[in-house]
Amino acid sequence: MNDTLISIVESHLSTGHVLLDVSEDKRGNYIRVVIDSERSVTLDDTTQLSQSLRDSNEIDARFPEGFRLEVTTPGLDQPLQYPFQYRKNIARQLRVTFMDGEIVRSLTGTVVDADDASVTLKDGIHDVSLSYDKIKSAKVKISFK
């Protein structure tokens, strides 16, 4: 991510929103912004950020020929990065890859608790607590019930 573009986008974020990713393709004058929040991010939220960025003099200066902008939220296939994302997924199943000493292990379980240091999953019978620094990847397991 480009530090200048990150700073510009972050200055336009609403309170509570977190910038997960920003990418740009200068040849195509395209900017893609991915945001999330502890609460649900609404279409109004993404529209408001889009409008704020479109009205930004800093963005205009970077793209004097104009630009295309996409503001979105992470898809279900995106790995979780922040504790609040684990909290948002309490009662959902996650597929987690983590370090157990020197061994990489995987676990699928239901999120029963999450705080700022760790997440607790129920793997059927047992509760397993994993600190975030041990987790290599965690994705929501999509189920169609």
Image (tube, helix red, strand yellow):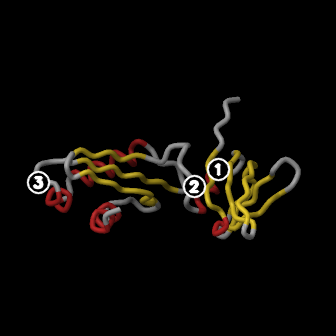
Q: Is residue 99 left or right of residue 2?
A: right
Estimate the x, y position of residue 139 in percent, counting from the top left. 61, 49
Estimate the x, y position of residue 133 in percent, counting from the top left. 64, 69
- Residue at 44% in and 58% down: 20
Reading the image, the residue beneath label 2 is: 80
Estimate the x, y position of residue 63 in percent, counting from the top left. 16, 54
Q: Quadrant of the N terminus?
A: bottom left
Are discs 2 and 3 less than 8 Å apart at CB? no
Q: How many marks?
A: 3
- Residue at 63% in and 56% down: 86
The kind of residue on which mark 3 rests is Pro
CA–CA distance between discs 2 and 3?
35 Å
Residue reaching furthest to the front: 102
Residue 51 higher or lower than 130, as above or below: above
- Residue at 56% in and 52% down: 79
Q: Is residue 79 left or right of residue 132?
A: left
The answer to which of marks 1 and 2 sits earlier in the sequence is: 2
Q: State the residue in front, 131 or 58.
A: 131
Q: Is residue 88 left or right of residue 58?
A: right
Reading the image, the residue beneath label 3 is: 64
Label 3: few (<14), some (14–19) or many (≥20) C-alpha neighbours in 10 Å: few
The kind of residue on which mark 1 rests is Asn
Q: Quadrant of the C terminus?
A: top right
Q: Secondary structure at mark 3?
A: loop
Reading the image, the residue beneath label 1 is: 89
The kind of residue on which mark 2 rests is Leu
Are discs 1 and 2 less than 8 Å apart at CB? yes
